[in-house]
Amino acid sequence: MQKFLEGYKTWSGIILTIVGLIGLPSWISEGQLSSLLESLFVILGILVSVYGNYKSHKQIGSLKKLAGIK
C-alpha cells in the first residue's frame, strides 16, 4: 500500500486541508455524510480488490514464465 500512495500523499493532504478550510463538512448533513462515507468505502474496497487482483495475476504470470509454463 505504501507504493500505491507514493506521490499522492502530499496532494491528498493538501486537498483535505482545503476541504476543511472552506468548511465543506458544514454543507453536508449527517445523513448525507453517512451515505457519502459508505459510498467512498465501497469504491475504495473495489479499487483495492482490483489492484490486488492485478498484482497477483502479474506475479502468477511471471512465475509461470520462470517455470516455463504457458
Image: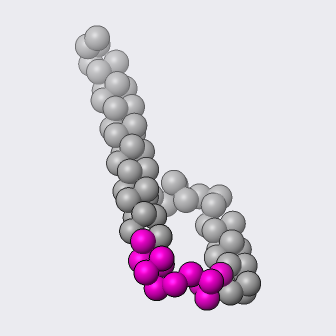
Is residue 66 among what the camera can see? Answer: no
Is the magenta region chiefly helix, strand or loop?
helix
Task: From the viewer's perspective, tell me whether residue 38 is left or right of residue 14.
Answer: left
Quarter the C terminus occupies: top left
**Magenta span includes 10:** no
Front residue (pair 49, 37)? 37
Q: Position of residue 15 (x, y in %)?
A: 68, 72
From the viewer's perspective, is 54 left or right of 25?
left
Q: Is residue 25 above or below residue 40?
A: below
Q: Residue at x 52, y 55 (%)?
A: 3
Question: Which residue is rendered at x = 45% and y = 64% of the image?
Answer: 40
Q: Is residue 51 above or below residue 4?
A: above
Q: Is residue 68 above or below residue 53?
A: above
Total numbered badges shown on the rendered structure: 0
For residue 19, what is the image quadrant? bottom right
Residue 22 in which image quadrant = bottom right
What x and y, as percent, mark residue 60?
30, 29
Q: Determine whether, in the image, residue 7 is placed left or right of residue 61.
A: right
Residue 49 appearing in the image:
yes
Report the span colored magenta: 24-35
Q: Residue at x 46, y 85 (%)?
A: 30
**What is the x, y in percent for residue 10?**
67, 69
- Residue 56 lies in quadrant: top left
Residue at the (55%, 59%) spot, across then down? 5
In the image, 53 versus 2, the foreground residue is: 53
Q: Is residue 39 above or below residue 25?
A: above
| Color style of the picture | one colour
Q: Quadrant of the N terminus?
A: bottom left
Give the percent coordinates (x, y) of residue 49: 35, 48
